[in-house]
Image: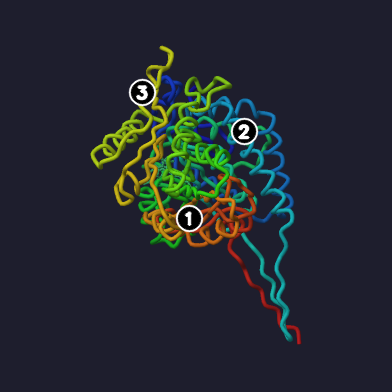
């Protein structure tokens, strides 16, 4: 599969004439090639977006909402293709690509279409004047996404961005370009006005050309914390609107009064969904001392029963890691855990059929015995790797949960809902679930504090980020 950029309504070879291989995570084999876009490709895409801006931003919001519905319909027709390409490109189980990636990509467009249709100007009356507050497009947006949830996150940005009247240039992860290409094919098929959505493939350099361009007005970035810092450095001097959704090291807090069976299921899912490669994954499990032994017995049994193997197999629960380099990073943390005084309770090399031997495989790994200050217990690993710790009081659980530079999410497991809410309100993060995890309502704010990011997206927060409010005050006395 040789992919092309999508600029001004046309699929184009990169002017840079440079290409990168796209590798299958599950076999290590080359599955296609991707443009490595250079300065002139990025400039052409930005120019196309700028040219399309006046007409698109001038359109009635309900007209733009209709376009979002057309895209959603066309994506829905390609539901199985999305799931197949996402599983092929990321190494995730096809069942997960169906239930999470394909489903959410369609619903992101439908959800924002409805929000934009329902949007109204705000009116504030004074004795002698009327204020009208109107949301207007910001301009040209750069939308940069990571490899773990490729189309899920790209559609989460494209839908509200163009719905609010902006035009955009997308830069998906170089490791997972396939469904971004599918979205461009959909946009082409429905006949969206050319230049409203453009896409350049490429690596971090291509991304930084976008974020640093004086012709880009807004940057929505999802990715690692250290990359986020670079993005902020290049975008801030030009006062661009900036949203950063970054890493996490989220705690799952298990109290002795939890429903143990449900909790073990929930905590296992939170730890290892998508091979632990979700920014929200509960990679630190804090367990109240009085149930620690019973919890561990049930948790390890649950982890060891997970089916690891061919991502295309319907029964597979754990697929491959994204790249060799990432696998080495995660395995490096296993060695570090031993150096830091931890013990491996379960984990090691998975047993796989011969055709998958070239892939990036690692079985789910559980580490105990580490101090809560250690690197393994505080740094984002972003793989099938969790540490488990004991606690003795609500206060101690909160202290451990907050003891990291990240502040994205967390989950609390208890039958005492009052306690659940009380503890949740003391966790320094953007989102906390009680007796559930990754339970998403698209209307609520999504994002983190501390090193997990700046700003929120989701519902009215997305509409706010992808727009500029204008206040018109008319005196009438
Ligand atoms: P990454 O930071 O390496 O890359 C993300 C994107 O940024 C890619 O498209 C990449 O090409 C691009 N990029 C790299 N350097 C750049 C630069 N200097 N300027 C502009 N763009 C640049 O992240 P990744 O490895 O693809 O993804 C994993 C990370 O993403 C994890 O840390 C994870 O926690 C985070 N993540 C966060 C959320 C969230 O909503 N908070 C969601 C998913 C993933």
Q: Residue 451 placed where, x, y %?
A: 39, 55
Residue count near mark 3 (Cα–Cα under 10 Å), binned few <14, some 14–19, many ≥20: few
Q: Earlier in the sequence, mark 1 or mark 3?
A: 3
Return the residue at label 2. Answer: 99
Specify whether tag 1 is near ligand 1 (CB below 8 Å): yes
Q: In screen coordinates, is 374 left or right of 290?
A: left
- Identify the disc placed on residue 6: none
Q: In screen coordinates, is 404 left or right of 414?
A: left
SS label for mark 3: loop
Real-space Cα separation, disc 1 to disc 3, in angstroms = 34 Å
Q: In screen coordinates, is 26 left or right of 121?
A: left
Q: Residue 355 placed where, x, y %?
A: 43, 13
SS label for mark 2: helix
Picture residue at 76% right of the left edge, 87% below the top: 477
Specify whether tag 2 is near ligand 1 (CB below 8 Å): no
Picture residue at 48% right of the left edge, 40% below the top: 278
Return the residue at label 1. Answer: 448
Whether residue 248 is visible here, answered yes or no, is: no
Real-space Cα separation, disc 3 to disc 2, in angstroms = 28 Å
Return the residue at label 3. Answer: 349
Kindly check if marks 3 and 2 are in contact, taking CB atoms under 8 A apart as contact.
no
């Amino acid at each position: 599969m040789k992919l092309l950029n999508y600029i001004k309504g046309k699929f184009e070879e990169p002017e840079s004439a440079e290409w990168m291989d796209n590798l299958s995570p599950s076999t290590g084999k080359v599955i296609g090639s991707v443009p490595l876009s250079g300065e002139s490709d990025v400039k052409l895409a930005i120019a196309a977006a700028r040219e399309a801006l006046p007409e698109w931003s001038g359109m009635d919001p309900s007209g733009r909402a209709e376009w979002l519905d057309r895209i959603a319909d066309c994506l829905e027709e390609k539901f199985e293709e999305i799931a197949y390409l996402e599983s092929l490109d990321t190494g995730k189980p096809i069942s997960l690509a169906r239930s999470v990636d394909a489903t959410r990509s369609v619903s992101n467009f439908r959800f924002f279409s409805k929000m934009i249709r329902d949007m109204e100007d705000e009116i504030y009356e004074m004795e002698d004047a009327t204020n009208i507050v109107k949301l207007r497009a910001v301009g040209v947006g750069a939308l940069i996404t990571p490899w773990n949830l490729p189309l899920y996150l790209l559609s989460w940005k494209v839908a509200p961005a163009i719905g609010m009247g902006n035009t955009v240039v997308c830069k998906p992860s170089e490791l997972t370009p396939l469904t971004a290409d599918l979205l461009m094919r959909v946009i082409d098929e429905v006949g969206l006005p050319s230049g409203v959505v453009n896409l350049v493939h490429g690596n971090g350099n291509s991304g930084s050309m976008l974020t640093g361009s004086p012709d880009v007005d807004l940057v929505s970035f999802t990715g690692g914390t250290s990359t986020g810092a670079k993005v902020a450095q290049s975008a801030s001097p030009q006062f661009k609107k900036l949203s950063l959704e970054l890493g996490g090291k989220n705690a799952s807090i298990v109290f002795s009064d939890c429903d143990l069976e449900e909790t073990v299921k929930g905590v296992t899912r939170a730890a290892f969904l998508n091979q632990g490669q979700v920014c929200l994954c509960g990679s630190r499990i804090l367990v109240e001392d009085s149930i620690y032994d019973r919890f561990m017995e049930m948790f390890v049994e649950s982890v060891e029963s997970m089916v690891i193997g061919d991502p295309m197999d319907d029964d597979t629960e754990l697929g491959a890691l994204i790249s060799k380099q990432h696998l080495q990073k995660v395995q490096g943390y296993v060695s570090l855990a031993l150096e830091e005084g931890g013990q491996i309770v379960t984990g090691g090399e998975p047993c796989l059929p011969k055709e998958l031997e070239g892939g990036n495989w690692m079985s789910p790994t559980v580490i105990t015995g580490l101090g809560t200050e250690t690197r393994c217990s505080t740094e984002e690993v972003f793989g099938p790797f969790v540490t488990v710790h004991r606690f003795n009081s609500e206060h101690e659980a909160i202290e451990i949960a907050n003891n990291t530079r990240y502040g994205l999410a967390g989950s609390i497991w208890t039958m005492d809902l009052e306690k659940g809410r009380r503890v949740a309100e003391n966790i320094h993060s953007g989102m906390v679930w009680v007796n559930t995890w990754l339970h998403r309502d698209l209307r609520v704010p999504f994002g983190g504090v501390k090193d997990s990011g700046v700003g929120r997206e989701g519902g009215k927060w997305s509409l706010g980020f992808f727009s500029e409010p204008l206040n018109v005050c008319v005196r009438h006395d």
